[in-house]
Image (cartoon, rainbow, N blue to C red):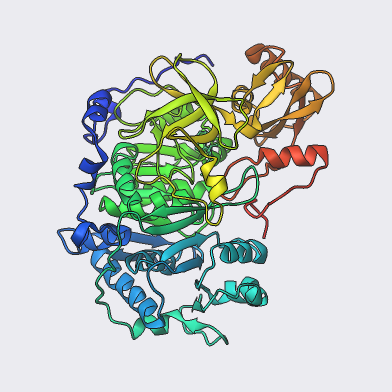
Amino acid sequence: MERPSIIRKTASDLYAIPNWTDYEKERQQFSWDGARQALQGLPDGGLNMGFEAVDRHANGALRDHIALRFVAHTAAPLELSFAQLQRETNRFANVLQQLGVVKGDHLFVLAGRIPELYISVLGALKNGTVVTPMFSAFGPEPIATRIQLGAGQVLVTTDLLYKRKVKQIREQMPSLRYVLLVAEDGGRTNEPATLDLRQLMDSASDIFSTVSTMPEDPALLHFTSGTTGAPKAAIHVHGAVIAHYATGQYALDLHPQDRYWCTADPGWVTGTSYGIIAPLLHGVTSLIDREEFDAERWYRLLEEERISVWYTAPTAIRMLMKYGATLAQQHGRPALRFIASVGEPLNPEAVWWGKEVLGLPIHDNWWQTETGGIMIANTPAFDIKPGSMGRPVPGIEAMIVERLEHEGELPRVRIIDSPDVDGELALKAGWPSMFRGYLNNEARYQKCFSDGLYLTGDLARRDADGYFWFVGRADDVIKSSGHLIGPFEVENALMEHPAVAEAGVIGKPDPVIGEVVKAFVLLKDGYAGDEILRMDILAHARKRLGAVVAPKEIVFVATMPRTRSGKIMRRLLKARELGLPEGDTSTLEGSA
Ligand code: AMP
């Protein structure tokens, strides 16, 4: 279906008075120092992420406002007000103090989305202890690798996860001084060489004075999700909280009366920055669903929980699209006013589907583990061009650059001023949530920068209106007959075909033309992957893209390899295609 290239915002699209409406003016007026004024800070220039998220509200007007609401299949909903969250996080911080766990020590959490995960992350931050939440579905190997790399001193996990995944590898993690267990049945544990967290919490004081941390002190250690290679540990500091606050305001349009749902797990940076910190900073009520994706359940939650702001991922949206409009129409969305998405390119089809089926366009935004917060976004302040990642948020300067050939170790680049040219996306370094290093890998960190610019490793283009368009990860780009082809462009065209639910596109080495474009296609329910359909999809792609860019080969697949954060692992599609080693697959969905 032919649609216009822009979704114009009208008054009826703006259900609440948006936090901002004038993009240029806000960017001109904005400064990071000014943004910091919205936060309280600690004496002598200190700043603490946990304090700003919890105590600032617990000590003020929002003390009895619900901060976190947990829902699960098997348990009754559980709510924690800001005041209760303050008491629980204080207890946890006091437990750490009693154990001699101090500022700068490293704590890992391995748990499903249970209250103790949130309490231990926030409590550790208040204690100045550096935190890493891990995906609870990780198997023993990725757990050991991460704890070894991060020299973790404390692990918070559940009794069942400990027995299944940690006990047998405990010797491989000599840095681990304490394992704190939460019994999944709500009772007590007495596992040798571990401590029972609830028991320790029960006897700990609920009064705690936040440890004095400075903006440059490390707060979080996030492992990159590794769509392209081995995981690296990005160091983030307490000062990142300024960016979490500002982007919660600009890109997610959070208002204190919102009921907000971020579907990401804290094992992925999105689930921490925007699943824990940013909503608390804005004093909103956050829904935390313990369960995995289930289309019917998700629609029910949007309806019954009266979610007003929803932050999710392209995979989830594509899955909902796969289930069709009827299911969506069986449920109301009485409070929903803003939808945002991150993690992968959001196909224009998906943005339109939001508008047409959910009644709201989906606001794509772009960032990475390394950037610590949203950098480029579609926001309430301007029209959406479906397929674009939007424009840089206030405080962020983004540009397109070209890497220059030269002898030295460190990269050299040239800024491309003209619009509509593909190149590498770069950001002017210095925003508060920028990573401050890869743990134990300074050389790799240095290679990310050139002349004060952070080089993202993503290819993109900027149009004349300042909107950025994702082309692909630099490593995923296909070189065919002298053309550079971004897999996203091809995937978008395939997604327009009515039978296609998802597509992953790679370059397959070819002696004549360099690489041929090959597509892996997951069909919607009710379509049979036969030769007629294959030819039809090929014909559609050729019509849309032309013979050079259209895939030469299409194969139908029953599942798409994805990371736990929902990204299609094109690297893995390629390795499997070529019979090469699969490399690090610890973040592959379904692996354990
Ligand atoms: P991670 O650090 O695991 O969150 O992965 C970051 C990478 O995900 C980016 O470098 C992009 O390649 C991709 N990504 C994230 N958001 C988007 C988006 N909105 N559009 C396109 N790619 C995205």
Give the residue drawn at x 58%, y 24%.
Answer: 404
Position of the N terminus, as image quadrant, is top right
At x 68%, y 26%, the residue is: 478
543 vs 418, left or right, is right
Q: Nearer the viewer, residue 579 or 362?
A: 579
- 523 in relation to 201, above or below: above
Residue at 50% across, 66% down:
108
x and y percentages locating residue 19 in the rendered image: 23, 36
The answer to whether 33 is drawn above or below residue 147 in the figure is: above
In percent of width and height, residue 91 lies at 32, 76
Residue 502 in sight here: no
x%, y% of residue 117?
A: 44, 66
* Residue 394 image point, x, y percent: 30, 33
* Quarter holding residue 363: top left
* Residue 483 versus residue 166 in the image, above or below: above
Which residue occupies the foreground of this view, 65 or 190?
Answer: 190
